[in-house]
Image (cartoon, rainbow, N blue to C red):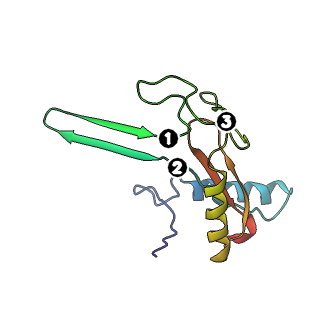
């Protein structure tokens, strides 16, 4: 595994790029120190991602397509809403539902156990709002 940590800089002046998360974090920590409110800030990743049942695509001379299939989809392509087992999440809904609405609980549990076996302590994992199959597994801030 290759892990690269670096700062993004503006080529014209060599200063930190204004929209680089590391530059923003450094500015926030400097402000915290200058304000006298504190001298240390902890920042860490908050991975959010999608888990789909399948993704198919094609690009050729006649056109292109992409199809994403998920048990959590509001409806299958050309299908009727509410086809899932259990209760479907509303469109752009689903922050922190529980099973059976959250169909990804078991796979997230397995992912967290695998991360913890590798020494990465996980603080929380849950379904995220916004779209079907969106999930989050957040390592503990002390893990980084």
Q: Where is mark 3, residue-wise?
A: 94
Q: On residue 39, which mark appears?
A: none
Circle 3 sits in a helix, a strand or a loop, which is it? loop
Q: Residue at x 25, y 41 (%)?
A: 58
Where residue 75 appears, x then y in whole percent? 51, 28
Q: Residues within 10 Å of mark 3 (few under 14, many from 20)?
A: many
Circle 2 sits in a helix, a strand or a loop, which is it? loop
Q: Is residue 107 left or right of residue 68?
A: right
Q: Residue at x 53, y 57 (%)?
A: 16
**Camera-side residue of 5 and 30:** 5
Q: How many marks?
A: 3
Q: Residue at x 63, y 32 (%)?
A: 88
In the rendered view, would you say 71 is above or below 15? above
Q: Residues within 10 Å of mark 2 (few under 14, many from 20)?
A: some
Q: Where is mark 2, residue-wise?
A: 51
Q: Is residue 36 left or right of residue 89?
A: right
3 or 2: tag closer to the N-terminus: 2
- Residue 12 occupies which quadrant of the picture? bottom left
Q: On residue 70, which mark appears?
A: 1
């Amino acid at each position: 595994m290759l892990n690269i940590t670096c700062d993004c800089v503006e080529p014209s002046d060599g200063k930190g790029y204004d929209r680089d998360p590391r530059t923003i974090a450094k500015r926030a920590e400097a402000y915290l120190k200058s304000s006298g409110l504190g001298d240390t800030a902890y920042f860490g990743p908050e991975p959010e991602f999608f888990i789909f049942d399948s993704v198919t695509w094609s690009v050729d001379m006649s056109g292109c397509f992409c199809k994403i299939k998920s048990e959590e989809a509001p409806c299958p392509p050309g299908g009727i809403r509410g086809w899932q087992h259990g209760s479907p999440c509303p469109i752009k809904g689903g922050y922190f539902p529980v099973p059976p609405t959250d169909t990804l609980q078991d796979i997230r549990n397995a992912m967290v156990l695998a991360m913890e076996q590798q020494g990465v302590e996980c603080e929380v994992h849950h379904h995220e709002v916004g779209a079907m199959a969106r999930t989050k597994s957040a390592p503990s801030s002390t893990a980084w």
